[in-house]
Image: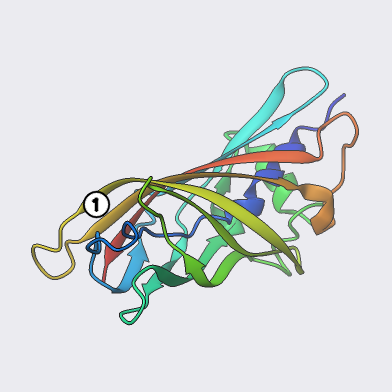
Amino acid sequence: MIPRPARAILLLSLIACGPAAASPAGGPALYAPGRYLVDGAATRVHFHVKALIGGYEGDFTQPEGMVMIDPARPERADVDIRFPVEKMTTGDASTDAMLKGDSFFDMAHFPIVRFTAQDAPLVGSDGATIIPGELTMHGQTRAVALSVQLTGVTPDEAPGIATLHFTGSMSVERSHYGMGFGRPFVSDKVDLTIDAIFRRA
């Protein structure tokens, strides 16, 4: 029997979720510099992992964190996004409980999955960029790369209204974070897709 918990692996990521947008080289900025907070209610991180038969999927919800766009260099930003393991869901209560237990995320000791990036490049003239950063999960930190596409910008017409909307994707290997249970029946590779909203603070 293939262990469903393998889905959990997504989260890794998730983590990966944190970039913002930028402006075309030499062109006007697409947004004002400053701090943008992630909209946890509107942001969705979806994961999918293949198995011997079919596959598994789920979501990480209600992230917290921000993107800080440098006023001196609006094409660069710092990113810090945190995903509470408690908010992970697969749609099956028993699977959720197993994934949050000590065989996988060990939520009691490691309640947060965190993605950070320093001086990260924001999206260029084609709306796309790669954000290099670090993903910390289950007490281990690994370098990751998040591919990002800016899909929308709302002008800063009033304080707190400016928003950035982007989609992103990345793949991680769960065994790198000490969560290799179920291999080889369930793939080590986890594919993540992100649909995120950031609002200017």
Query: How far from the left and from the top, in percent, is residue 170?
Result: 61, 45
Query: How far from the left and from the top, in percent, is residue 198?
Result: 33, 59
* Rendered image quadrant of residue 96: top right
Residue placed most toward the observer, 178 or 153: 153
- Left/right of residue 75 with respect to residue 84 in the rendered view: left
Q: Residue at x 57, y 55 (%)?
A: 16
Residue furthest top in the image = 53
Residue furthest left in the image = 157
Residue type highlighted by circle 1 = Val
Q: Residue at x 48, y 50 (%)?
A: 61
Query: How far from the left and from the top, in percent, is residue 105?
Result: 73, 56
On the rendered image, what quadrant is the N terminus found in? top right
* Rendered image quadrant of residue 72: bottom left
SS at badge 1: strand
Colour pattern: rainbow
Residue placed most toward the observer, 132 or 63: 132
Mark 1 neighbour density, 10 Å: few (under 14) some (14–19) many (20 or more): some
Residue placed most toward the observer, 141 or 76: 76
Q: Residue at x 13, y 70 (%)?
A: 159
Residue placed most toward the observer, 52 or 164: 164
Residue furthest front in the image = 26
Residue furthest bottom in the image = 72
Q: Residue at x 30, y 80 (%)?
A: 71
Query: How far from the left and from the top, in percent, is residue 130?
Result: 54, 54
Q: How many marks?
A: 1
* Rendered image quadrant of residue 145: bottom right
On the rendered image, what quadrant is the C terminus found in? bottom left
Residue wearing tag 1: 153
- Left/right of residue 45 with respect to residue 155 in the rendered view: right
